[in-house]
Image (cartoon, rainbow, N blue to C red):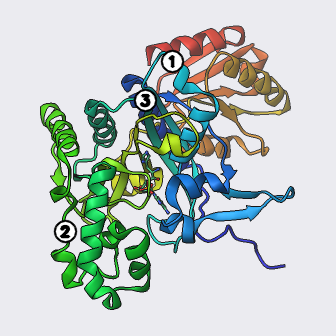
Amino acid sequence: MSNIKGPRGTQDILPGEVEKWQYVESVLSDICHRYHYKEVRTPVFEHTELFQRGVGDSTDIVQKEMYTFEDRGGRSITLRPEGTASVVRSFVQHKVYGSPNQPTKLFYFGPMFRYERPQQGRMRQFVQFGIEALGSDDPAVDAEVIALAMNAYQELGLTSLKLVLNSLGDLESRKNHREALIAHFKPHKDELCEDCQMRLETNPMRVLDCKKDREHPAMETAPSILDYLNKESREYFETVKSVLDKMGISYVIDPNLVRGLDYYNHTAFEIMSEAEGFGAITTLSGGGRYNGLVEEVGGPETAGIGFALSIERLLMALDAEGIELPIDEQLDCYVVTVGQEAKKEAAAIVYQLRQAGIQVDKDYADKKMKAQFKAADRLRAKYVLVLGEDELANGQINVRNMDTGNQQTIQLEEIVEHMKKEFKED
Ligand code: HAM
């Protein structure tokens, strides 16, 4: 039988690599705690309609990239391509908007699924970390979300970052801009790619984001959303920028930053890696404001803003900048035994030490003493505990500190207390 491999665009994260994920996830959770965002966990699959309405029928995600199937009950189900729609659905379903603590500030980790052409930094299953702040249209919340994102990258040691900012304005601003875009691109319609010809009808702003038509001369002269912002939208954007200025967070404005999901308005942003060798895809994360999405999903009028990053691209950026994460790969203790009796006794000692909170392992392959020492070495054990026939006869155990080379003989009944003390001093 031929070997079965994991599906294209998925990956296994094995020990050795998984510690990086755990470390990064712990730093991100810790930052959320400081910014007072609480974790939410939503299902990996939802009714397809949620994403059609939430993410938007005309987006690439909904049109081309969703893992959609009929379940055994005949319902159309989709593996979530992103987290925002699910978080908003759960916010509405559980009437969280009724709580006196608003805005509701949430974060999440979890696998997302998009049927994309896999390449470096683009997976079919990838893990997003995201935050959503629901229930406030204070521009300071926009700045808080951006600050959290930048803070996260910087705390992990990244320096080659670029924050790109745009405003998509409110409904009125976008409507005026839409008309201007249609008038601008209509004469060139036949020269644009097939997707853009359709986008021109459904969502002309997305033409600005097209990879194929990037070089078309009409792109450069396309009307900028920033010239179509009405007074309110302009003031809103100015306030977001001035709060970022006060925080000392620098950014560049890109009026062509449109984002690939339909729910955005006002603030939109992406964070890019500028590290050499990062690869073709430079976007590390993206987000923005989505006032109106809660109503779309059936809830009351509620403002919202958030962002998401994928851990895959974050780890790529750390790699590209040569950042070593402070991961402790050493084993605390390894117990070496000689003889059958010692083996049995060691099983009990290992159990007691583990109960006392100490990380311990031993040989289970009947290895000779020398091979056991080698294993302890390979696992970079901080302490090696040796239980030979002599030690056992005397009710003792030999404790070696592998860093200092110090050796001590300890009474068996005192070993747990002794090791607890050793680690307290460490
Ligand atoms: P998005 O821009 O579609 O936005 O995705 C956010 C981030 O997820 C991207 O910047 C990238 O780091 C990562 N990502 C997306 N697709 C892939 C992929 N195929 N492989 C690896 N990483 C990927 C959203 O998903 C919005 N829900 C963000 C948001 C939250 N907006 C408001 N709140």
Q: Distance between the residues labelled 1 and 3?
A: 47 Å
Between 108 and 143, the residue placed more toward the observer is 143
| Label 2 residue SS | loop
Q: Which of 160 and 167 is in front in this view?
A: 167
Label 1 SS: helix
Q: Mark 3 points at which residue?
A: 135
Residue wearing tag 1: 423
Residue holding disc 2: 223
Q: Is residue 252 left or right of residue 46?
A: left
Residue 126 rendering spot, x and y as whole percentages: 54, 56
- Residue sitting at 73 percent across and 44 percent down? 368
Q: Where is residue 10 in the image (x, y as percent from the top left)?
A: 60, 63
Q: Which residue is drawn at 53% across and 46% down?
A: 296
Is label 2 in contact with label 1 (beta carbons under 8 Å)? no
Of callouts 2 and 3, the N-terminal one: 3
Distance of label 2 from label 3 (alpha carbons): 32 Å
Which residue type carries mark 3? Gly
Q: Which quadrant of the figure has residue 164?
A: bottom left
Please tell me whether residue 75 is drawn above or below residue 90 in the rendered image: below
* Quarter of the picture holding the C terminus: top left
Which amino acid type corresponds to the residue marked 2 in the rendered image?
Pro
